[in-house]
Image (cartoon, helix red, strand yellow):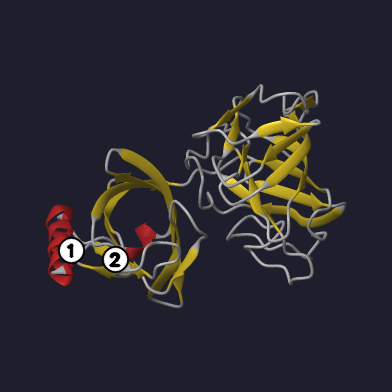
Amino acid sequence: MYSKLLLCLVGLLFCLSGTAQDAKTLEGKWNLKITEEDKEVPSWLEIKRSGHSTLVGQFCYKFGSARPVSEVKVVNGTFSFAIPAQWEPKGFDMQVLGMLDGNQLKGTLIYTDGKSYSWVGTRAPTLAYDANPSWGKERKLFNGQNLSGWTAMGENQWVVEDGILKSPKSGSNIVTNDEFSDFKLHVEFKYPKGGNSGVYLRGRYEVQIADDHGKEPSSIYFGAIYGHLIPNEMAAKPSEEWQSYDITLIGRRVTIVANGKTIISEQNIPSMTGGALDNDEASPGPIMIQGDHGPIELRNIRITPVL
């Protein structure tokens, strides 16, 4: 039944496409919006060439990390690829089918449970980099007294105690009411043994917070842009100690100083990370703190925006 559905969808896309497309027009980075039930969720796809004729890529769903695509197959004007489950429920490999429609990609995602959802993709924007920006005045994002300026994205478990912003258990993420384009961000945090959280820049790019002291650096460990950028060293302290990030984001280019050590220096963030609020990358966005992975404490959250 599942294979018949897949064949029917491929056939439908072929009928809609009208003419065969040059595979080169698919190459690049695409921001996808998937319509699941009545909600649009962000996703991302990169298609690139491996050797003379094979297309490969990366795919980032609404959660988890960017994952490799071993082959993007192009037949009769349509393309398709399969993605094994990562954090999705067990079932089928996810199938992604699409076609080029003018300046957009359009297609269908078949989830691990066999349900199908439509999606539309646009090319990821180029974000300007200013090497010498004019910085505004630094200001506090957290006043140390209450949740003023922040909103919990669901039932609120966040509290303020003794000047510390705390999520005592897994629950909702929390976001700033204000949005930002380019900025310098300082944040101090502490987690218990095995702790896991994250700071989302513009609500789209997660800087991983996790109990990874003593491990080799990884794209999913402490200090990484989750699933994308690997720190050049592991700068995490043991759990239960206060730690800090100083993060500069200009366009796509990010520098991260963790506990006084520069672990990522002026690297371009390829795309949204899993858990992003959206992938409208040309727009300002909030600072989001992850509260759905366990307890976390924060203090001295300050931001310096560009003028």
Residue at the image point whose x is 73% and y is 51% from the top: 191
Mark-to-mark CA distance, 2 and 1: 8 Å
Q: Are marks 2 and 1 in contact (CB under 8 Å)?
A: yes
Question: Where is residue 158 shown, x and y percent of the image?
Answer: 63, 35
Residue at the image point whose x is 44% and y is 53% from the top: 44
Question: Where is residue 214 shown, x and y percent of the image?
Answer: 79, 70
Tag 2's secondary structure? strand
Res. 210 image quadrant = bottom right
Residue matched to label 1 = 10
Q: Judge by depth and name the residue closer to the eye, 113 or 102.
A: 113
Q: Is residue 71 above or below residue 18?
A: below
Q: Is residue 174 left or right of residue 55?
A: right
Q: Is residue 285 above or below residue 14?
A: above
Question: Where is residue 124 shown, x and y percent of the image?
Answer: 47, 47
Residue density around tag 2, few if under 14, some if 14–19, many if 20 or more, within 10 Å: some
Q: Is residue 196 left or right of residue 126?
A: right
Residue matched to label 2 = 80
Visible in this render: residue 99?
no
Tag 1's secondary structure? helix
Amino acid type for the residue under numbered disc 1: Val
Amino acid type for the residue under numbered disc 2: Ser
Q: Judge by depth and name the residue closer to the eye, 271 or 244.
A: 244
Give the position of the C terminus as an image quadrant: top right
Give the position of the N terminus as an image quadrant: bottom left
Dot placed on the residue nearer the N-terminal end, 2 or 1: 1
